[in-house]
């Protein structure tokens, strides 16, 4: 197999939203790693299953309110084999019980790039938990998306690859608050270019959730009375410190769908480094330009189509201006915003910015292929806590759009 050597210069979000709408993200590991040999260049050797797959859907001990289910079908951006290591190997219950290269798990064609797998479930549910069983070289998952029955995609979790010592590994994403959205698909992105570990193999993915019409278990103790969600006044523009300077303000002037790649250097006031490499996140992708901001390790990644139009901009994950500190970023402010969302099923950007008395730090903006604009903002407190918002055409409308993340 030909190895592709590529460095990902852009992920869909530079927030590294340590969790989007995943107000608690944890890893639970029940098996100690063995000494797994690295795959030989150009070949893989399937091994026999340790156990047979279980049934595709399991009720919880609590009865019918919550169900647990395994994927019934799957597709992927690529697969190492037509049978072994193909996307269907990630359907059903886990059947690889030790760390190692195993054809009973999904593996992408290349061991050094960005790939994805999309899993479909028999029963749409309001999600409460996702369990990702990784059987080889885990920890290279960088994004998990949810797709509802209407085809709308929500980002459930984002992060950066970080080497861990446990293998196999169970990655668990939990949702503290159940929103009214019926999920039937889960999409998992792996970036194998960062750690250079080799194939990240996924054995199974469990979706846990509440069926439509079932009680969600939410209580109304100490309800927060939300203020009117008026958009009459514009969002504040009270930038200070580094964010008030020409580099960030120039970055804000880059508009996906309008700005041309030739205008970037002039707007930002820096010279971008062109870096296309081998990754094409969409068919119309032509180039990605990297701008080193020279502040708090931040870099901007701006992608341009074959027509020369910017379609995406983002700032490197886990970075933000160190002088961006707000006293308004509190759990009480989040509860106020969450109450607006529960009441209206929407939070306009202007309302959120006015509630937090700041326009926020724009870490990503993408003109999606479906024509909608997705914009990600962070608001930081001095102690490192943050409130995040993901806006589609200027409005939070889904489960992954609003979160409070303590440091």
Image (cartoon, grey):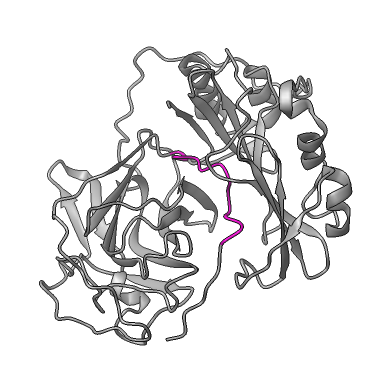
**Residue 55 falls in image quadrant:** bottom left
1 to 5, vertically: above or below: below
Residue 112 x/y as whole percent:
46, 70
Residue 100 x/y as whole percent:
22, 70
217 vs 60, left or right, is right
Residue 246 x/y as whole percent:
83, 33
286 vs 66, left or right, is right
347 to 50, vertically: above or below: above
Q: Nearer the viewer, residue 369 or 285?
A: 285
Residue drawn where x is 60% and y is 40% of the image: 297
- Main secondary structure of the magenta stretch: loop
Q: Nearer the viewer, residue 241 or 342?
A: 241
Q: Nearer the viewer, residue 114 or 43?
A: 43
Residue 8 x/y as whole percent:
56, 61
| Span colored in magenta | 8-21
54 vs 2, left or right, is left
Which quadrant: the C terminus? top left
Magenta stretch contains residue 10? yes
Magenta stretch contains residue 134? no
């Amino acid at each position: 197999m030909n190895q592709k050597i590529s460095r990902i210069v852009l992920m869909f979000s530079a927030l590294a939203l340590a969790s989007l709408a995943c107000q608690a993200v944890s890893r639970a590991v029940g098996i100690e790693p063995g000494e797994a040999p690295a795959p030989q260049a150009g070949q893989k050797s399937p091994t026999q299953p340790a156990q047979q797959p279980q049934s595709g859907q399991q009720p919880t001990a609590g009865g019918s309110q919550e169900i647990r289910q395994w994927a019934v079908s799957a597709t992927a951006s690529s697969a190492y084999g037509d049978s072994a290591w193909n996307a269907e190997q990630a359907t059903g219950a886990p059947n690889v019980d030790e760390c190692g290269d195993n054809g009973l798990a999904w593996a992408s064609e290349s061991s050094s790039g960005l790939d994805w797998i999309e899993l479909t479930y028999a029963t749409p549910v309001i999600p409460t938990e996702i369990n990702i069983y990784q059987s080889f070289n885990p920890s290279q998952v960088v994004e998990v998306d949810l797709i509802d029955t209407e085809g709308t995609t929500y980002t459930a979790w984002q992060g950066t690859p970080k080497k861990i010592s446990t293998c196999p590994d169970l990655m668990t994403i939990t949702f503290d608050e159940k929103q009214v959205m019926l999920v039937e698909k889960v999409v998992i992105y792996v970036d194998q270019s960062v750690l250079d570990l080799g194939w990240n193999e996924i054995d199974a993915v469990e979706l846990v959730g509440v069926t439509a019409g079932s009680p969600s278990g939410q209580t109304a103790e100490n309800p927060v009375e939300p203020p009117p969600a008026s958009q009459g006044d514009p969002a504040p523009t009270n930038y200070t410190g580094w964010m008030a300077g020409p580099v960030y303000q120039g970055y804000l002037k880059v508009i996906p769908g309008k700005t041309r790649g030739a205008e970037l250097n002039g707007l930002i006031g820096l010279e971008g480094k062109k870096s296309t490499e081998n990754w094409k996140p969409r068919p119309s992708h032509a180039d990605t330009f990297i701008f080193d901001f020279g502040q708090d390790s931040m870099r901007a990644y701006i992608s341009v189509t074959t027509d020369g139009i910017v379609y995406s901009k983002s700032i490197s994950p886990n970075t933000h201006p160190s002088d961006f500190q707000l006293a308004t970023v509190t759990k009480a402010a989040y509860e106020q915003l969450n109450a607006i969302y529960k009441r209206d099923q929407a939070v306009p950007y202007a309302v959120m910015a006015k509630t937090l008395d700041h326009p926020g730090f724009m870490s990503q903006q993408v003109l999606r292929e479906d024509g909608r604009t997705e914009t990600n903002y962070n608001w930081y407190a001095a102690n490192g806590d943050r409130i995040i918002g993901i806006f589609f055409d200027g409005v939070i409308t889904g489960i992954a759009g609003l979160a409070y993340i303590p440091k």
